[in-house]
Image (cartoon, rainbow, N blue to C red):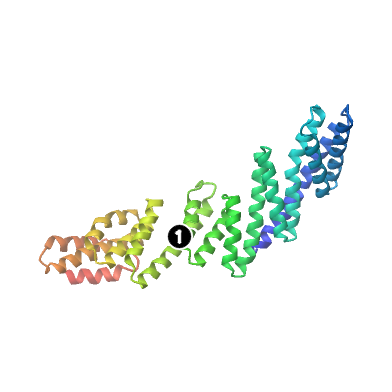
Amino acid sequence: MPLVEKIMNNFNKKLNITERIMKKLVLMAVALFSFAMVSAQSASEITAKYNEAATALQAKDWAKALENFEAVVKGGMDSEDSNVLNCVATAKKYIPTCYQRLGLRAASAKNWAEAVKNLSTAAEKAELWGDSTAKLKSNQILAKVYQAQGGEAFNAGDYASAVSAFEKGYAANKRNTEMALYLAESYFKLGEYQKGMDVCSNICGMNATKYADAIAEAKEKMAMYTNNEVARLQQAGDHDGIIAMADSMLATDPTSALAEKIRVQAYNNKKEYDKVIELGETAAAAQTTEEDKSDVYFIIGAAFNAQYNAGGNKDVALKDKAVANLQKVTAGNSVEAAKTALSNLK
């Protein structure tokens, strides 16, 4: 199912769920205040406004409910009447919900600007009145709106516009890993390698059980786009750039097998064989597949072999170390090259 269509279905589900919950809450509120005793005209007016809001809410007239609830808060917040203060407290509870509802309705019609305005206001009101649950929910829905908006741009290949929307959604809800992955992909498409890596790294730092699938996908993206970036830098002869990139990756994730591998490759391409030998065994140990381990052992063996040749083939210890490492190449694309190198060392 396309990204935008899936998100729109989620909006419609949220509308249906909220309608069932709201009907129950409204009936309870109306029952409570129908027996309220008021002692002053102002208190009576505020209670009447509240009941108008409750009736509108039950009728799903969110705009009218919002108008009356806000009038209740404005007119009754300084009252000393306990019934009025109860009306104000309940109105504050429902105002963010009304804004959420209006935001969802606008989102269902793909009126993104109106949806963002209402949902942002819902979050602001909830924060103002200390309702952390309503704030979280508002931001979650807001993030979905930005996700849908960004999804349209992404599907059209407009990655700059997609990033603009996804960034705002990501700021609203960093736990929306689906959108975070689209944001990372958009960065990568635009050549913003480090930004894409940063988002993927954030995903990888989340709860490993709850977000296992997202973490796995983030790691796949990191590997693929890192290899692409390495290829680009290699073509430009920028080995130091590759080393700096690997160092940056290791600073974020000291266990990164990919970073260890590309770093020794870069030092080998620079012909800094001492560094290859210094870092090689750690890099090999970090690898998780026999193919990758073999690739690293081939690089180490080639480095010892290069030093052996540079010394006029006199240092037998270097030759033995070259052979020992080349014999560890048992899988992957380096096997045939290792066999050839071993044959030449005999």
Q: Residue at x 56, y 53 (%)?
A: 177
Q: In this rendering, does residue 290 appear at all?
A: no
Crowdedness of circle 1 by 10 Å Cα count: few (<14), some, many (20+)?
Answer: some
Q: Residue at x 24, y 72 (%)?
A: 340
Q: Quadrant of the C terminus?
A: bottom left
Q: In this rendering, does residue 218 appear at all?
A: yes
Image quadrant in which you'd find residue 295: bottom left
Residue that sits furthest to the left in the current view:
314
Image quadrant in which you'd find residue 23: top right
- Asked if residue 254 lies left or right of residue 34, the reply is left
Q: Residue at x 75, y 60 (%)?
A: 109
Q: Is residue 220 above or below residue 83?
A: below
Q: Which residue is mark 1?
A: 194
- Asked if residue 343 lies left or right of residue 332, the reply is left
The spot of residue 327 in percent (x, y) is: 24, 62
Q: Residue at x 29, y 53 (%)?
A: 282
The spot of residue 169 in percent (x, y) is: 61, 54
Nearest to the observer: residue 317 or residue 80? 80
The spot of residue 110 in percent (x, y) is: 72, 61
| Disc 1, SS | helix
Q: Quadrant of the N terminus?
A: bottom right
The spot of residue 37 in percent (x, y) is: 88, 27
Q: Amino acid at mark 1?
A: Gln
- Asked if residue 289 lies left or right of residue 165, the reply is left
